[in-house]
Image (cartoon, grey):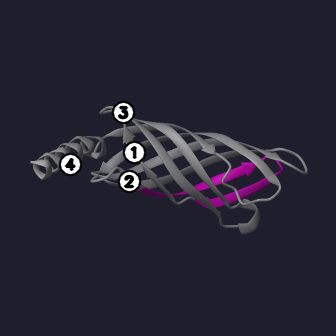
């Protein structure tokens, strides 16, 4: 009886989660980013806000555009403000809520540095209901032109809205 109940529960969960990842579904997300995972010894606190809008072009495949802002408090020197604009894609593994993503973004820092970054991420969708999810993710912004200065590791937590 216990095995039957668990099997039935897993089937219901996977069917209800599939509706969010269907073709022609729109997506909006707002996230807090940074959350102090940087490996720079001079950087004390990083906190940012990120907005993402996407569209499922196929089941489980989403393309997105992203706009972000980060503020970094630096121990020695001036604080740094960053603005990012980017695009990318995500693949949702529907059986468990896990998603994998990769994008490309342009970042401008207030200290007159400009970076082009490759942005792989892995995250998870905790669904509050059919249209709203909490989405923690771990990301790595890999700088293509100044690796040691522009690359960062971070954690973000956001709310996703599926239409």
Disc 4: CA contacts within 10 A as few (<14), some (14-19) or many (>=20) = some
Is mark 2 in CB contact (under 8 Å) with mark 1?
yes
At 40% from the left and 54% from the top, the residue drawn is: 99
Residue that mark 3 sits on: 128
Alpha-carbon span between mark 3 and mark 2: 15 Å
Disc 1: CA contacts within 10 A as few (<14), some (14-19) or many (>=20) = many
Q: Earlier in the sequence, mark 2 or mark 1?
A: 2
Q: Earlier in the sequence, mark 2 or mark 4?
A: 4
Highlighted magenta segment, given as a residue range: 100-118
Q: Earlier in the sequence, mark 3 or mark 4?
A: 4
Where disc 2 sits, the SS reads strand
Q: Earlier in the sequence, mark 3 or mark 2?
A: 2
Mark 2 or mark 4: which is in front?
Answer: 4
Alpha-carbon span between mark 3 and mark 1: 9 Å
Disc 2: CA contacts within 10 A as few (<14), some (14-19) or many (>=20) = some
Indicate the position of residue 11 as horizontal and vertical percent values.
17, 48
Task: Say which mark, if any, is on residue 10.
Answer: 4
At 27% from the left and 54% from the top, the residue drawn is: 95
Where disc 3 sits, the SS reads loop
Is mark 4 in CB contact (under 8 Å) with mark 1?
no
Indicate the position of residue 141 as horizontal and vertical percent values.
62, 59
Q: Quadrant of the C terminus?
A: top left
Where disc 1 sits, the SS reads loop
Q: Where 163 falls versus 107 (above or below)?
A: above
Alpha-carbon span between mark 3 and mark 4: 17 Å
Is mark 3 in CB contact (under 8 Å) with mark 1?
no
At 15% from the left and 51% from the top, the residue drawn is: 7
Indicate the position of residue 121 as horizontal and vertical percent values.
51, 57
Residue that mark 2 sits on: 98
Task: Say which of 79 and 75 sits in front.
Answer: 75
Task: Say which of 158 and 163 sits in front.
Answer: 158
């Amino acid at each position: 009886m216990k095995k039957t109940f668990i099997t039935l529960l897993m089937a219901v969960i996977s069917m209800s989660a599939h509706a969010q990842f269907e073709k022609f579904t729109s997506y909006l997300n707002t996230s807090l980013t940074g959350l102090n995972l940087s490996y720079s010894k001079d950087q004390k606190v990083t906190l940012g806000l990120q907005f993402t809008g996407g569209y499922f072009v196929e089941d489980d495949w989403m393309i997105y555009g992203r706009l972000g802002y980060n503020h970094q408090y630096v121990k020695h020197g001036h604080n740094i403000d960053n603005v990012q604009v980017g695009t990318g894609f995500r693949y949702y593994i529907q059986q468990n809520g896990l998603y994998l993503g990769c994008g490309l973004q342009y970042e401008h820092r207030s200290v007159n540095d400009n970076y082009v970054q490759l942005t792989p991420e892995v995250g998870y969708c905790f669904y509050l209901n059919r249209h709203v999810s909490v989405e923690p993710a771990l990301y790595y912004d890999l700088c293509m032109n100044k690796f040691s200065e522009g690359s960062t590791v971070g954690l973000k937590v956001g709310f996703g809205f599926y239409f």
